[in-house]
Image (cartoon, rainbow, N blue to C red):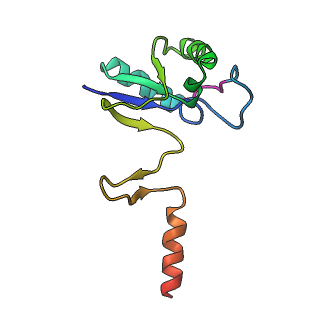
Amino acid sequence: MSGWIGVDLDGTLARYDRWRGPEHIGEPIKPMLERVKSWLMQGQEVRIFTARASIPEYIPHVERWLEKNGLAGLEITNVKDFRMIELWDDRCVQVMTNKGQPIRTKGLWRDNLRKLLVKL
């Protein structure tokens, strides 16, 4: 496969409930960890896409966590490029290409309910 898949760390690959400092990274989220390992076994390039990468001193903590959880050597970044084909993240809202309309959001059901109630 060409291109790479970005996988967010906190809240997507590792459990996150609140910021506890750069050295703390939660336990792995098993379904996502297995998904990443499966992609790697298929030859897919995967990068850890995290805001932690914006502070160089935080990267060694992420590297240790990845090594401990069987993902040693993955690139850690916070920068997209033209080869990125997907981003898996707990905070993303996907939009329709060239439309600016959300495909699905956490609050979308609320918006649809409001529209329905206004019509009634």
Residue 46 in the image: above or below residue 73: below
Residue lying farthest to the bottom in this orientation: 120
5 to the left or right of 89? left
Residue that appears at 61% across and 23% down: 55
Q: Main secondary structure of the magenta part?
A: loop
Pick the residue in front: 86 or 35.
86
Residue 115 in the image: above or below residue 93: below
Residue 27 painted magenta: yes
10 to the left or right of 39? right
The image quadrant where one finds the N terminus is: top left
35 to the left or right of 64? left
Q: Quadrant of residue 29?
A: top right
Q: Position of residue 41 (x, y in %)?
A: 34, 18
Report the magenta residues as a range: 25-29
Residue lying farthest to the left in this orientation: 1
Pick the residue in front: 118 or 69.
118
Q: Position of residue 49 (x, y in %)?
A: 48, 29
Residue 1 painted magenta: no
Residue that appears at 65% across and 24% down: 25
Residue that appears at 37% across and 19% down: 40
Q: Position of residue 43 (x, y in %)?
A: 30, 18
